[in-house]
Amino acid sequence: MECIAEALDDFKSEIMPKVRDAINALKAEYPDDFKRSARMGYLKGRMTDLIEKSFYLIADYERLTGVEDIDSRLFVGEQLLGAVKTIGKLQDEVIHLRKPPRKRKDDITDDDIRRAKEYPFEMLIEIEGNRMARCPFHEDHDPSFSIKNNYGYCFGCQWKGDTISFLMQKEGLSFIEAVRQLQ
């Protein structure tokens, strides 16, 4: 078990930053208009797949309505609900991408901020199980830092925030520096 944990730590600390840098370098080679249209195409494809999957799930749910197997019906219902929620999130991003990008005076776009907030918390803090970690903002012997929906909260010191505010406080960075580092 320790071997797996060590391999994961190596992966997170050595390989993932290199992969992220390579992806960012590749992204930088393409114009913003191309990136937006490629992302829009990807999102629409994902939505189409999820809508098709939802139709099958609805049919399965209706078929299971007359059957006594409540576990299967609940499972299919949860999958359908998850698919609908994901479709909504994808649709929100498509709507957002249709708007022309706004440049702020500090040369950071709203997309940059959105991506920084979506940066996985697990890449910033070591999770010890059940979405809990040791809080870096106070002496923490037992994990008291909870992560849910990519938002952190410490039950010990009551710190709360997203990945941007976490990095700002942990590393002493400005908002702009934290957003850029989370790209």
Image (cartoon, rainbow, N blue to C red):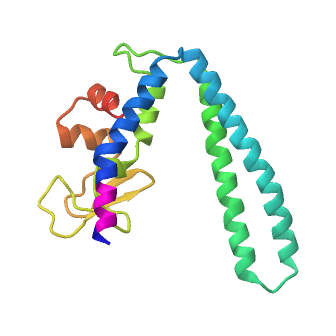
Residue shown at 40%/37% (left/top)? 19
Q: Is residue 18 above or below residue 87?
A: above
User: Which quadrant is the C terminus positioned in?
Assistant: top left
Position above or below: 170 against 149 = above
* Residue drawn at the location 44% of the way across and 41% of the way down: 118
Along the horizontal axis of the image, is 70 left or right of 11? right
Nearer the observer, 65 or 32: 32
Q: Can the viewer see residue 43 in this picture?
A: yes
Q: Image point 20% across, 43% down: which residue?
A: 170
Residue in front for this viewpoint, 39 or 154: 39
Q: Quadrant of residue 14?
A: top left
Figure quadrant of the N terminus: bottom left
Query: Residue 141, image x and y in percent?
Result: 15, 68
Please state the horizontal and vertical placement of residue 34, each as a whole percent of the image: 60, 18
The location of residue 140, given as percent across then percent down, is: 15, 64
Which stretch appears magenta? Answer: 3-9
- Of residues 161 and 122, the one nearer the viewer is 122
Residue at 24 percent of width and 67 percent of height? 143
In the rendered image, the residue lying farthest to the left is 139
79 in relation to 97, above or below? below
Instruction: Look at the image and say whether residue 130 sits in the magenta stretch.
Output: no
- Estimate the x, y position of residue 96 in percent, counting from the top left: 59, 29
Q: Main secondary structure of the magenta part?
A: helix
Image quarter of residue 74: bottom right
